[in-house]
Amino acid sequence: MLFRSDSPSDLSKSLSYFDEYCKMWKLTVNIAKTKILIFGKRPDKTHHVFKLQQQNIDIVSEYVYLGILFTRTGRFCKSQKRLAEQASRAMYAVFRKLRLLDIPIDCQLKLFDNLVQPILLYGSEVWGFENCIVLERVHLNFCKYILEVKQSTPDFMVYGELGRYPLD
């Protein structure tokens, strides 16, 4: 369940209404997985205590919700780095298979588009307005690998040779 509130008192009220709803329908909430994330540029100095089912809820500085990492600053840089790491693991798994097989470049690009790119772009509806350099680096590494060129090869030449565009 995701709650949004502008003040601590409103959040406490929302939590108490939610608690009543859970009691009425005999629902249980896993308090260990329930966290509160307070958005702001600086850490909140005031100590708030929020309770659900007579238990304190932890206040955290970052939280993964539906696979997207949210931080208190509201920026998605860490989330993009996390996605790039996951996509890199998938990309190296594809590399292992490509070494064993002699696959044409267009099929290799299709493998990237179907296996790695969805990981890179997961949740882009939420964070897509951010700078995507970290994610594009994974894309370019794959393209340079299949072309067997140096990492210092200009990016525009790699895009042009493969007829591709940056992910953003």
Image: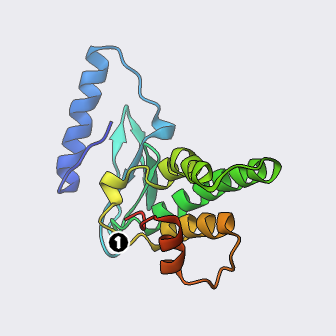
> What's under tag 1, amino acid-wise?
Lys
Vertical arrangement, residue 57 with respect to residue 71, above or below:
above
Answer with left or right where residue 21 lies relative to residue 44.
left
Number of marks drawn? 1
At a point 56% along the width and 51% down the height, the residue shown is 116
Q: Which residue is mark 1?
A: 45
Most extreme residue toward the right is 100
Most extreme residue toward the top is 25
For this rendering, which residue is in front, 159 or 25?
Answer: 159
Vertical arrangement, residue 94 with respect to residue 163, above or below:
above
Q: How did the renderer colour the structure?
A: rainbow
Image quarter where the C terminus lies is bottom left
At a point 29% along the width and 69% down the height, the residue shown is 40
At a point 40% along the width and 64% down the height, the residue shown is 76
For numbered disc 1, what is the local secondary structure?
A: loop
Give residue 44's position: percent from left, percent from top: 33, 69
At a point 43% along the width and 49% down the height, the residue shown is 122
- Dot 1: few (<14), some (14–19), or many (≥20) neighbours within 10 Å? few
Is residue 48 visible from the viewing direction of this image? no
Answer with left or right where residue 168 lies relative to residue 111.
left
Give residue 153's position: percent from left, percent from top: 61, 83
Give residue 127's position: percent from left, percent from top: 34, 60
Image quarter where the N terminus lies is top left
